[in-house]
Amino acid sequence: MTSKETIRKRLEMLRAEMKSAGIDEYLVTSSDFHASEYVGDYFKVTEYLSGCTSDNVRLLISNDAAYLWTDGRYFISAAEELQDTGIKLMKMGETGVPTPTEFLRQSLGEEMVLGFDGRCVSAHDGEDYRRAAKDRGAEIESVDLVDRIWLDRPPMSSHPVLLLDESLTGEGTDSKLTRVREYLKRFEASYLVLSKLDDIMWLFNFRGRDIACNPVALSYAVVGLETADLFIQSAEVTDEFRTHTRNHLVKLHEYGEVYDYIRDYHFEGRIFADRSSSSDTMIQLLKEKEEVIFGTNPTTLMKAVKNETELGHLREVYLKDSVELCRFICRVERDIGKKPMTEVTAAYELDHLRSQIPGYLDLSFPTISAYGPNAAMAHYAPDAESAGSLLPIGFLLVDSGAQYLGGTTDVTRTIPLGPLSDEMKMDFTLVAAANLRLLYAKFPYGCTGVNLDTFARAPLWKYGKDFNHGTGHGIGYILNVHEGPQNIRWRANKRGKDWAFEAGMITSDEPGIYVEGKYGIRTETITECVDAGSSDQGRFLTFRPLTFVPIAREALDLTYFSEGDRKLFNDYHRQVREQIAPHLEGEELDWLLQATEPIEE
Amino acid sequence: MTSKETIRKRLEMLRAEMKSAGIDEYLVTSSDFHASEYVGDYFKVTEYLSGCTSDNVRLLISNDAAYLWTDGRYFISAAEELQDTGIKLMKMGETGVPTPTEFLRQSLGEEMVLGFDGRCVSAHDGEDYRRAAKDRGAEIESVDLVDRIWLDRPPMSSHPVLLLDESLTGEGTDSKLTRVREYLKRFEASYLVLSKLDDIMWLFNFRGRDIACNPVALSYAVVGLETADLFIQSAEVTDEFRTHTRNHLVKLHEYGEVYDYIRDYHFEGRIFADRSSSSDTMIQLLKEKEEVIFGTNPTTLMKAVKNETELGHLREVYLKDSVELCRFICRVERDIGKKPMTEVTAAYELDHLRSQIPGYLDLSFPTISAYGPNAAMAHYAPDAESAGSLLPIGFLLVDSGAQYLGGTTDVTRTIPLGPLSDEMKMDFTLVAAANLRLLYAKFPYGCTGVNLDTFARAPLWKYGKDFNHGTGHGIGYILNVHEGPQNIRWRANKRGKDWAFEAGMITSDEPGIYVEGKYGIRTETITECVDAGSSDQGRFLTFRPLTFVPIAREALDLTYFSEGDRKLFNDYHRQVREQIAPHLEGEELDWLLQATEPIEE
């Protein structure tokens, strides 16, 4: 952990650079050039400057102050990390807290200069900042000032790519390119400019290793009606991949050349681009072209709806992943109070179990193993020094997943290690009800996550409880564990629409309750969206679980389950037993049978 | 009812006018100049041209075809009305049915002219049409062609206004004007241009009689930081009202002068206007002014949140209204099969009972009394000739309400007149569950109707059932029975945002199930949004019923009620008995006691 003194020094160095560049306020983001949710070390600029490890950060530095915005997942951890740095934490979404743009509308003045590296600022944000600056009579300058002070900055990561066979992808690059080109024609567009890394991986059927846990390669692509251009670091290109691209008439270029290429290329026809994954710099370039239309990348929806090959692999991989998590929970429950365990040793054990599964590539995110009050920090990650010892009391929350050749997993279970308070049991039961009601919801085609979230939150709301994060996110296939376009949350998307669910989408179902200083509970089951038949009222959809791991029956207080909840709980556990039992034996099988015993209906 | 032949003749006359005016396609709407939901006879242009009595209509006439768009409430009735007229019904919102704008994007061509009366076209629609025309190389001409052929067109309605005392409004015009002006200052605006009739009534504390069932006066207003101008037909201005406006420094102008006034007036400062209630003509005029900012009229939200005086009157008036509906249901159930009754005589009886309530002014909409299959038409209104006789079998659906000095009511109950099929009972029970789950929902501050609708629809969706209208609409106070900005429906608002609920809002809760050719069920209870306490998760809200009328227990099939639904059903009926019993006696009291007996929990 960087010392507070170092942080203050770095901020002073940056202020010196700002002064010499004539910049009054400088904004840095936790983004890479692709609006990726997680980024390589090269891009960890906000962490370098503030010590704050949160994602989704905007850090604004002025001559005499600094402000850091992050979202509800990180309020507790960021507050700790920012203590004594002089950086003020701005809790996004809380009443009375201005957004960065609202803040700039106050802080910027006539003839002031706002600086940022436009490649690391999303087009949406860039537009907001530019409008705010314009309205206040201020100027914008796009420049990477941090590079000037960060002398030991890690190099941009670069690893040979992995080509995926059609037995894994279920659809060749030819077919995907054809679908994209048909989509372009429908919009009378001739080019798609892709900045979104997972979309590029999906389209060209390869994977990279440039971001920890996210099997993507830093790249850009321009797909024309006849042509396709891929920008990627040459060190990443294997012979096999070169052949693959040649076979699909994809021309390779050096990664860093993309901005010059776009600037100089004469596009014949309309360009389609996605604001939400393009950088401010890219959009500024595209706007100088003849005609650009903005929308969501067609690849985003195509990628989200998994095909039968992908779904087959996913079901298989989730089953294996579930078996290992069952094994893990069985061992933790067996050993607690008998062998020394910490949050970190527990995480290691689970990570190790997963790594033995055939096709294992990497974790899909750093395992969250959070004991007691630590679990109230929704995305707490322990380090070996500070990790809490596990005691035979209260809850251990474990949120984990991996990348396999066959899919990307994610799952959370909250494991009771011993006696629980009445409040813990009440909350555990309400979270289980929330999880199950959403999992077994039936809803008409056209519903978005805003409609569906009520299924999960209603049982919590009933008791004046709630949680400060989304209920569900889409999940990639051997790709990012957070993947759009669908999600489940109760607040409507302010930028663009909320997406309707489609059969074949993979989405998490992860309600929680967090009591600061006491405990955190989250139950996350990954779901596959499936058809639920049609009536004269149209087509209906529902979910099917991919995750088969018991929800601790001993942590329930049945007072807080309705009759219907009890039935759903037993339905789910009947499925868990059916799926998992054939893969366990001995004490692990005994544990499973006990854990899946029906509760009283 | 206008004959089909007359309709065809009128269309031909219009086509002749189109030809001589050089117009290729002419669009007429069911709107007045104020985007009112219901309109005076003068404005019933779509009905004159098509015979279709639906609201929310757009009728497009070309040289050789005509297309009429309306929404799900009217699909069945409009289909009947349009038969043999040559006009094609376009079912809004159904898959594959283009919107009027999408349609125009196909039908308009280079150098064609699209005509409409811009005063009767909403600004939103006007913009869409103008963009479509522009993209297709077509022109727009704003002209009222129908006036040229409609020789016996009724005059624009004009009635003396009614001034409301502060004992009824709870807030004087001074205070309301101050609030509006403070709002304008926050937006650095100097004027509010109001076209929305109910907003004008609310702001200046008066009511009119220019639209049946909607106590509004045709008017416009321009509120400046120091000035206020009201445009109203001079025949409507009473001495008392003249004094009232003089006391509040409101300058009166003739209604018809507003467009000239806006055109010629030199506005000093920014103008605030609401696109959703301003006509295309008004917006075109405003756009020529220095600076206009668009948003929702501040009066819209202010009006929606009822004050304690209004709420006090509403609770009282809803109680009296509920008592009369109870009396009505008791009599219908007593007399069915014994005395001859039709849909219309039943409606008359209910209307008569209501008219005896002190403070009665008018109905709030024409009573819907729909028997058997007629009730599958969600907004069926019988006429004396075609009205169905009531038989001691199946359901009678009655949706009704009135305007009182004390509030605007609305309520629907579906009354079983005799034996019911299993399917009817199932659907009735599911609708009751839907109604009660929404009524007793608890939810965090910030929720919109999109979040809340799931409470109502979930029990229907579970069985693949649904209904093709919103679950709830806001309701005015001695004003329109449909009032924004809040509503409850599962599809997000495509134009602008969905509004969060506030304590003091009055909203209907009216799920239904309609089986074409068989029956229709709707249960509508009007709710008051109230505080439900705060927790560390913030503030919560819930609803409280204003309507206290039994939901027929004899029509239930308890199989389709969860344990929780049974409890809610009994909770509601305990309240109904408590509220209504003191106001009934004899056989009516006996009926109530029987109707509010608890069901088995």
Image (cartoon, coloured by chain):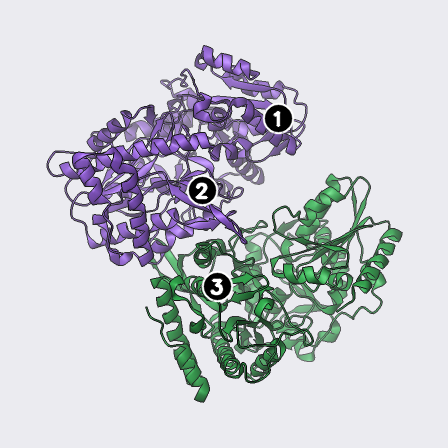
Chain colours: A green, B purple
The image quadrant of residue B41 is: top left
State left or right for residue A315 relative to residue B48.
right
| Residue at mark 1 to residue at mark 2: CA–CA distance | 33 Å
The chain containing the residue under callout 3 comes to A
Q: Are marks 3 and 1 in contact (CB under 8 Å)?
A: no
Looking at the figure, which quarter contains the N terminus of chain A? bottom right
Reading the image, the residue beneath label 1 is: B191
The chain containing the residue under callout 2 comes to B
Per the image, label 2 sits on a secondary structure element best described as strand
Front-most of B514 and A169? B514
Amino acid type shown at disc 1: Tyr
Reading the image, the residue beneath label 3 is: A423
Reading the image, the residue beneath label 2 is: B530
Looking at the figure, which quarter contains the C terminus of chain A? bottom left
| Residue at mark 3 to residue at mark 2: CA–CA distance | 27 Å
* Residues flagged by tags 3 and 1 on a common chain: no
Q: Crowdedness of circle 1 by 10 Å Cα count: few (<14), some, many (20+)?
A: many
